[in-house]
């Protein structure tokens, strides 16, 4: 069946074909329903629902023009799901159909080729009595839906070369995971405190107002009595908010104390174990160094992301990362920990010049391969929106108060936001695949 426009996709496919297949009668779906500034094409309520309220088990259904690629509309659907607190969504152009759970793609199939298992997968959401599905579906073997509550996953973002986008990666990846319904904790282990600032925790303007000096990540690492709950602050850079263990500029001077305290290396690992039920993801930002803070992060982590601008020094620095990982993995054996799973080198802060992207970028990516690291398919380009989001301020009287935001909050429909959405998809898929194969 061919559809000529969006109206035919809505009428001929959604109303007269898809909804009846799902067993949804007219009393359970609502068309062109509005919530504030959000207008939904269709909202389907679960069995027993009596009104179009934002229940988690409702289903958003968005219909697009048959010639529109669905990828262009994924970010907007996910934003609707996150803002309305709805766990399920369908995006279709009459040619393809994508089904999302908690903003993660579960399956993508031809719209007119829905199989029984796909229909049952959606119906079990709308008819809870059908029970849970026996398995999760995948678009491809490498793209798996990530289960909401498996166990806490710790991801470290590290490169011993500075200025490669570590902070930007941590902040925006944390924002996306939070918006998708995960409980996220950020830990800043870099004395430059860029992530602490970018998370909106560093609001003071003078040294006298500094409220981080006496309680930060150093105290968490150096004292057995200090728990994560004692140190954590609420970041203001995204909504829903993310908890942050802040760093401080004084961390540089305190490094020698930790070097001479053998228990400090495993302190974070032990304290994270005590909050394993409280968080789905922990993201650790690290210094651009081969020091004890980087060592603590890598001893504590499950996964590693290595951002790189792919310039010669950054690529040469991958050899240092490679050697450091060998040392760390040997040390992890003493704590009965398996080797770190390297998710990949993430091309970041990449120039957008068309000639560079066509000619130079492929050569730089090829140069990374000799170091033996996998490379993310996602790429984070250097765009104004990323810088403006972190430089945002609010005016209070005569003062400009820092009010940094993730790019997802600053400009959710931007190219940068789409790039980080793609990155989050890839990270979740890699972790899910690793979990499936077994650590």
Image (cartoon, rainbow, N blue to C red):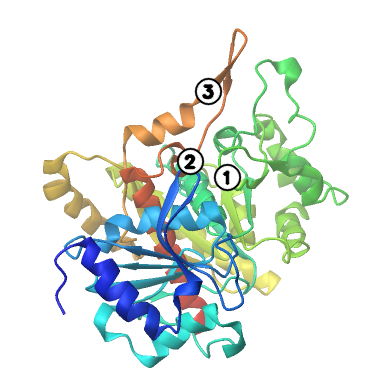
Q: Which residue: 15% across, 43% down?
A: 356
Q: Please tell me which residue lies in front, 266 or 74.
A: 74
Q: Which of marks 2 and 3 is nearer the N terminus?
A: 3
Mark 2 to mark 3 CA distance (whole Å): 14 Å
Q: Which residue: 52% across, 43% down?
A: 289
The residue tagged 1 is 239
**Residue farthest along the front direction in this orientation:** 27
Identify the disc placed on residue 409: 2
User: Residue 133, image x and y in percent?
Assistant: 53, 87
Contact between labelled residues 1 and 2, with CB atoms less than 8 Å apart: yes
Q: Which residue: 69% across, 30% down?
A: 250
Mark 2 Cα shell of 10 Å, populated few (<14), some (14-19), many (≥20): some
Numbered disc 1: secondary structure = loop
User: Residue 424, image x and y in percent?
Assistant: 44, 59
Residue 398 appears left or right of 355: right
User: Residue 412, image x and y in percent?
Assistant: 41, 44
The residue tagged 3 is 393
Residue 299 appears left or right of 370: right
Numbered disc 3: secondary structure = strand
Q: Please tell me which residue lies in front, 257 or 153.
A: 153
Foreground mark, 1 or 3, reads: 1
Above or below: residue 394 compared with residue 31: above
Q: Which residue: 64% across, 71% down?
A: 151
Q: Can residue 211 be seen in this view?
A: yes
Mark 3 Cα shell of 10 Å, populated few (<14), some (14-19), many (≥20): some
User: Residue 211, image x and y in percent?
Assistant: 76, 27
Contact between labelled residues 3 and 1, with CB atoms less than 8 Å apart: no
Q: Earlier in the sequence, mark 1 or mark 3?
A: 1
Q: Quadrant of the C terminus?
A: bottom right
Contact between labelled residues 3 and 2, with CB atoms less than 8 Å apart: no
Identify the disc placed on residue 129: none
Q: Can residue 319 be seen in this view?
A: no
């Amino acid at each position: 069946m061919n559809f000529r426009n969006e109206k035919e996709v809505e009428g001929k496919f959604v109303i007269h074909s898809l909804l009846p297949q799902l067993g949804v009668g007219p009393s359970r779906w609502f068309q062109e329903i509005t919530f504030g500034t959000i207008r939904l094409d269709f909202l389907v309520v679960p069995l027993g629902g009596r009104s179009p309220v934002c229940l988690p088990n409702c289903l958003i259904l968005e219909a697009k023009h048959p010639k529109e690629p669905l990828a262009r509309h994924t970010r907007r659907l996910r934003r609707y799901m996150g803002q309305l607190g709805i766990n399920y969504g369908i995006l279709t152009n009459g040619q393809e159909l994508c089904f999302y759970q908690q903003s993660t793609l579960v399956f993508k199939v031809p719209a007119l080729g829905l199989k029984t298992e796909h229909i049952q997968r959606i119906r079990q959401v709308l008819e809870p009595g059908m029970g849970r599905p026996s398995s999760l579906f995948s678009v491809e073997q490498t793209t798996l839906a990530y289960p909401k509550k498996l166990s806490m996953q710790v991801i470290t973002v590290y490169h011993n070369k500075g200025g490669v986008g570590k902070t930007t990666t941590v902040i925006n990846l944390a924002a996306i995971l939070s918006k998708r319904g995960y409980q996220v904790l950020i830990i800043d282990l870099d004395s430059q405190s860029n992530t602490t600032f970018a998370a909106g925790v560093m609001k003071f303007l003078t040294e006298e107002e500094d409220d981080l000096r006496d309680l930060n990540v150093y105290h968490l690492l150096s004292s057995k009595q200090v728990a994560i709950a004692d140190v954590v602050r609420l970041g203001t850079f995204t909504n829903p908010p993310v908890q942050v263990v802040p760093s401080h500029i004084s961390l540089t001077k305190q490094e020698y104390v930790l070097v001479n305290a053998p228990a400090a290396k495993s302190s974070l690992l032990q304290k994270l174990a005590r909050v394993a039920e409280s968080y789905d993801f922990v993201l650790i930002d690290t210094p651009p160094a081969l020091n004890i803070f980087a060592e603590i992060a890598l001893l504590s982590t499950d996964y590693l992301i290595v951002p790189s601008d792919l310039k010669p020094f950054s690529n040469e620095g991958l050899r240092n990362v490679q050697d450091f990982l060998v040392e760390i993995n040997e040390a992890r054996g003493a704590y009965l920990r398996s080797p770190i799973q390297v998710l990949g080198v993430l091309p970041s802060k990449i120039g957008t010049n068309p000639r560079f992207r066509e000619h130079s970028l492929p050569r730089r990516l090829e140069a990374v391969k000799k170091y033996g690291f996998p490379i993310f398919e996602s790429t984070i380009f250097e765009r104004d929106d990323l810088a403006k989001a972190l430089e945002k301020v609010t005016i209070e009287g005569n003062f400009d108060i820092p009010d940094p935001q993730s790019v997802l909050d600053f400009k959710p429909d931007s190219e940068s936001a789409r790039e980080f959405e793609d990155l989050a998809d890839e990270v979740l898929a890699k972790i899910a695949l690793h979990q499936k194969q077994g650590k």
